[in-house]
Amino acid sequence: MSPKSFLLTLGIFCGGYLSNTLLDGVVDAAEKYFHVQTSTYKTDTNGYIICSPEKPKITSADLGPVTLKASGEP
């Protein structure tokens, strides 16, 4: 690896780190200034977001087999 490519790679990584760090600081300052709270979501064991603790009610229990018709059939 040449010194030029090493320095270029190092610059890219350091630049990415600095920009992310600065962006995090700006977002934190904006949240404090505008009194914005980021919401935390509850997740289940699979990582899915739980929107409501209530389970949806099944209104139609018609769980018969599904039959598909070809487009030319009535």
Image (spheres, rainbow, N blue to C red):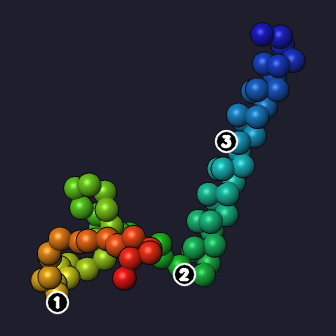
Image point 17% across, 71% down: which residue?
65
Q: Quadrant of the C terminus?
A: bottom left
Image point 71% across, 42% down: which residue?
16
Asked if disc 1 and disc 2 are in contact, CB closer than 8 Å, the reply is no
Up-down relation of residue 13 to residue 58 (above or below)? above
Of callouts 1 and 3, which one flags the residue occurring earlier in the amino acid sequence? 3
Q: Quadrant of the N terminus?
A: top right
- Where residue 6 appears, x then y in whole percent? 78, 19
Of callouts 3 and 2, which one flags the residue occurring earlier in the amino acid sequence? 3
Looking at the rendered structure, the secondary structure element under dot 2 is: loop
Up-down relation of residue 61 to residue 46 (above or below)? below
Nearest the eye: 45 or 38:
45
Q: Quadrant of residue 28?
A: bottom right
What amino acid is labelled 1 in the image?
Thr
Q: What's the CA distance linking mark 3 and mark 2?
A: 27 Å
Residue 37 lies left or right of residue 10; in this view the side is: left
- Would residue 46 be visible to someone looking at this image? yes
Q: What's the CA distance linking mark 1 and mark 3?
A: 52 Å
Image point 69% across, 54% down: which residue?
22
Quickly name the residue at label 1.
Answer: 59
